[in-house]
Amino acid sequence: MTFNSALIIAVWLCFGTINLAAGDIGTATSYDPPYLPTRCKGYSEDQFPEGGYFVAASEGIWDNGAACGRKYRMRCISGLKRPCKDESIVVQVVDLCRGNPCKSTLVLSNKAFSAISKVPTAKINVEFAQYIKINYPLSS
């Protein structure tokens, strides 16, 4: 067993949760309501995650609708006027970007965007990774 494997097992035994991700770099902007209808679930209000952190995806992420419901952990890494807050958030894809071409890789709800950027009208550079949370029950 390698040191890295042992470390992963130790974290799992201590915390019971492993978050797996493979990251990418892109851009983000925000969009205003109305958020309905969406390309994922139309007029259904229950598609929006608790907390209001959701996104519309550009064509490159959309994958013919397979991105619906997918979650991403993301953080601001740079932009004009130093917009970044020192936060990372988890967002959920609920729509396809409405612009053609889309103005950014991910278009965030106002609430999600304000969680990572101090400048509400900025176009920011973000690091994002698909978020997969695996919970393992701890043995008693």
Image (cartoon, grey):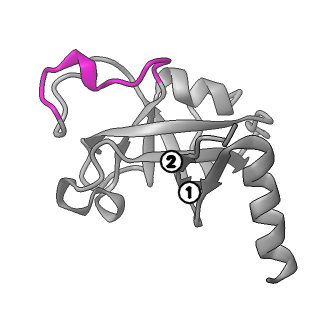
Classify 10 Å Cα crowding around label 1: few (below 14), some (14-19), many (20 and above). some
Expressed as whole percent of the image width and height from the top left, the position of residue 60 reads 34, 65
Residue at image location 38% in from the left, 22% down from the top: 32
Secondary structure mostly seen in the magenta stretch: loop
Asked where in the image residue 23 lies, by quadrant, the reply is bottom right
Q: Secondary structure at mark 2?
A: strand
- The residue that mark 1 highlights is 129
Q: Are discs 1 and 2 less than 8 Å apart at CB?
A: yes
Q: Residue at x 33, y 52 (%)?
A: 102
Residue 72 is tagged as 2
Quarter occupied by the C terminus: top right
Residue 19 in picture, x, y percent from top left: 63, 52
The reply to whether residue 40 is visible in this rendering is: yes
- Residue 79 appearing in the image: no
Q: Which residues are magenta?
A: 41-52
Residue 16 occupies which quadrant of the picture? top right
